[in-house]
Amino acid sequence: MSIDELLARDGLPAADRLLVLAAVAIWRGDWPQLQRIVAAARTLARPRADLEETLLQAVLFCGFPRVVTAFEQLAAGWPVPTPPRGGSMPAAEQAAAGAQLFAGIYGRNEEAVRAMLRGCHEEFHDFVLQAAYGRILTRPHLDPRRRELIAVAVLAAQNQGRQFAGHARGALHFGATIDELREVLVSTFDAADAVQADAVETWLRHVRPTK
């Protein structure tokens, strides 16, 4: 499906779908697609900050090299006189806000997820809580529901089933619906045929709210 066809679908606001599509394009390194998304965002008069925040979040899921290129694509397709800056919570509030967001996403599984992260490496646990949750995911321009939908899309594209399930539940905790998750997956897999549509439903069967 084309971007226009996806944006015309019911079940997910066009503004949210654009960010989902942008994040998946970054993961895939599909720069022509990202340029089309940037153009669509401008046509729909969306705030450029929507894309800026999606790119910053993509650092956590796609890595620095892809996001450097993504910012170059954004600058080429939507130039601004000065680079954007700021937008994060005050530094003194980030740790508490990040911990609250982490708890809101994982619900009763919070301590199990923390234990898993510590089992990888104590520094890794601290980095995830401080940098990912405290500094990036709490940035207020995008609310937790939209950020979780972005996360769900990229994790599905990466075939990261367990992490997909955790963040899909997080999206539900913050007000997303199963229909919205379905449309995120449709956008991720371009589910225009029966095979891909079956794959979407298979992913959804792994989602069970934990609160």
Image: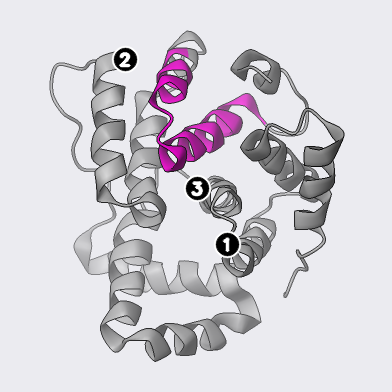
Observer-side mark, 3 or 2, equals 2
Could you say where residue 59 lies in the image, as x and y percent from the top left?
Answer: 33, 50
> Residue type at mark 3?
Asp
Could you say where residue 45 lies in the image, as x and y percent from the top left?
Answer: 46, 13
Q: Which mark is residue 77?
A: 2
Give the residue displayed 36% in from the left and 56% down from the top.
60
- Cα separation, mark 3 vs mark 2, equals 25 Å
Tag 3: Cα neighbours inside 10 Å, few (<14), some, or many (≥20)? Answer: few
User: Which is the main secondary structure of the residues drawn in magenta?
Assistant: helix
Task: Kindly state the secondary structure of the residue where label 2 is placed.
Answer: helix
Tag 2: Cα neighbours inside 10 Å, few (<14), some, or many (≥20)? Answer: some
Q: Which mark is residue 160?
A: 1
- Cα separation, mark 2 vs mark 1, equals 31 Å
- Quadrant where the N terminus sits is top right
Q: Which mark is residue 143?
A: 3
Provide the residue span drawn in magenta: 13-39
Tag 1: Cα neighbours inside 10 Å, few (<14), some, or many (≥20)? Answer: few
